[in-house]
Amino acid sequence: MMGLTAKEVAQRLGVSPGTLRSWERGRAKTLPVRSLGLIVRFLGYDPFPEPTTIPERLRAWRRAKGWSIRRAAAFMTVDPTALGSWERGGLILHRRHRAVVAGILGIPVSDVSESMAARWAQRHERSPR
């Protein structure tokens, strides 16, 4: 990879060569959050699918930073439980929180508000009788 040995790649990522082999062979069920940002920077791109929704974009932002939910929530000055909910598609109810999310994602607050309004409407549609 890029003319580097596995040992050199492991050193750059701050993991053991055995851990790197485990990742390469698909043996690891998950990658440590702190390693994801390093991997993205090392590769020069995010190998995960392109995020399209606000929850996916929030996860991608946090992954690129290599931050846990707790660390990202502290940065955003929100509760970690709330951020976890938002990343799973939960509603962002407070205007201040929508503004924080919009700022992080580099999108207008109105886009976040419209997304939340659409999501709320979907959850509260009445099923036909």
Image (tube, rainbow, N blue to C red):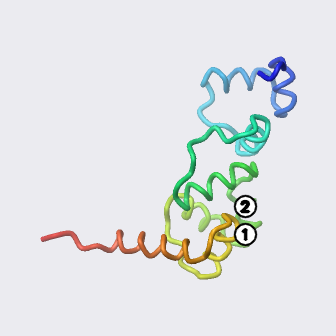
Residue that extends furthest to the bottom in the rendered view of this protein = 95
Q: Position of residue 88 (x, y in %)?
A: 52, 58
Horizontal side of 125 relative to 64 (left or right) equals left
Q: How far apart are the two marked residues, 1 and 2, measured between alpha carbons?
A: 6 Å
For badge 1, the amino acid type reads: Met
Q: Are marks 1 and 2 in contact (CB under 8 Å)?
A: yes
Report which quarter residue 39 is drawn in.
top right
Q: Name the secondary structure under disc 2.
A: helix
Label 1: how many residues lie within 10 Å, few (<14), some (14-19) or many (20+)? Answer: some
Q: Name the secondary structure under disc 1.
A: helix
**Disc 2: which residue:** 72
For badge 2, the amino acid type reads: Ala
Pick the front one: 36 or 27 = 36
Pick the front one: 86 or 98 = 98
Label 2: how many residues lie within 10 Å, few (<14), some (14-19) or many (20+)? Answer: many
Residue that extends furthest to the left in the rendered view of this protein = 129
**Disc 1: which residue:** 76
Pick the front one: 118 or 91 = 118
Disc number placed over residue 11 in the picture, else none: none
Q: Quadrant of the C terminus?
A: bottom left
- Name which residue lies at 64% across and 37% down: 47
Q: Position of residue 103 (x, y in %)?
A: 69, 70
Report which quarter residue 81 is drawn in.
bottom right
Q: Position of residue 25 (x, y in %)?
A: 63, 20
- Name which residue lies at 82% across and 26% down: 10
- Name which residue lies at 84% across and 34% down: 14
Q: Is residue 129 above or below residue 5?
A: below
Horizontal side of 58 relative to 38 (left or right) equals left
Q: How many marks?
A: 2
Q: Quadrant of the N terminus?
A: top right
- Name which residue lies at 53% across and 78% down: 93
Q: Position of residue 45 (x, y in %)?
A: 70, 40
